[in-house]
Image (cartoon, helix red, strand yellow):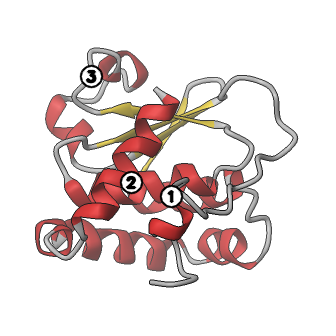
Amino acid sequence: MTGLGPGPERSGGPGARPRSPGPRAAPPDHHLLYDADCGLCRAITGVVLWLDRDRRLRPVALQSPEAPSLLPGLSAEQRLASFHLVSPPGRVSSAGPALAELASVLRDEGRGARALARRPAIARRGYDLVARNRSRLGALVPRWWRVWADRQIAQRT
């Protein structure tokens, strides 16, 4: 995967070009809740954190004791059904509808965030397709990527 996404050459190892952080010095103001038991979910969370140059996101495993307090009113089954983004002052968006807001947090103020916001049905269907097939897709994620993603998550928790 040379030049695309995370990889050994971008993982912070020897010869890696470090990702320059944005100007933000404040603590994270958004919580990204993900399924820690899902390899694909962790791999995607790692990429999202890597893209978060401003360090606005704080990853929280859905299985953690903190998750219920961040997602009040959701049952354990509802919490585990998708990823969730908790924005100030505690507004929760989940699954496909959360993608546009997540793109905005990642400073994708351009085409990606606007396209997702204008076409929520497409974002929802795309998210649902990946979520329904996450076990199959997760099996395709190389071990090095999962290790790399776990390091990205550990650095932020």
| Label 2, label 1: how far apart the Cα atoms are | 7 Å
**Identity of the residue furthest to the right in this view:** 23
Quadrant of the frame with the N terminus: bottom left
> What residue is shown at x 79% (from left), y 65% (from top)?
109
Left or right position of 87 against 27: left
- Say which mark, if any, is on residue 79: none
- The nearer-to-camera label among 3 and 1 is 1
Secondary structure of residue under mark 1: loop
What is the secondary structure assignment of the residue under circle 2?
helix
The one nearer the camera, 149 or 88, is 149
Q: Is residue 136 among the parts visible in the rendering?
A: yes
Looking at the image, residue 153 sits to the left or right of residue 31; the answer is left
In terms of image quadrants, where is residue 118? Answer: bottom right
The residue labelled by disc 2 is: 148
According to the image, label 3 marks what residue?
64
Residue 9 screen position, x and y as percent: 52, 69
**Label 3 Cα neighbours within 10 Å, binned few <14 / some 14-19 / many ≥20:** few
Q: Are marks 2 and 1 in contact (CB under 8 Å)?
A: yes
Amino acid, disc 1:
Ser
Q: CA distance from mark 3 to mark 1?
A: 26 Å
Q: Position of residue 67 (x, y in %)?
A: 33, 23
* Mark 3 secondary-structure assignment: loop
Q: Position of residue 56 (x, y in %)?
A: 67, 37
In the image, residue 145 sits, relative to residue 42, either above or below, namely below
- Work out whether 35 lies above or below 3: above
Q: Which residue is mark 1?
A: 11
Q: Is residue 59 visible?
A: no
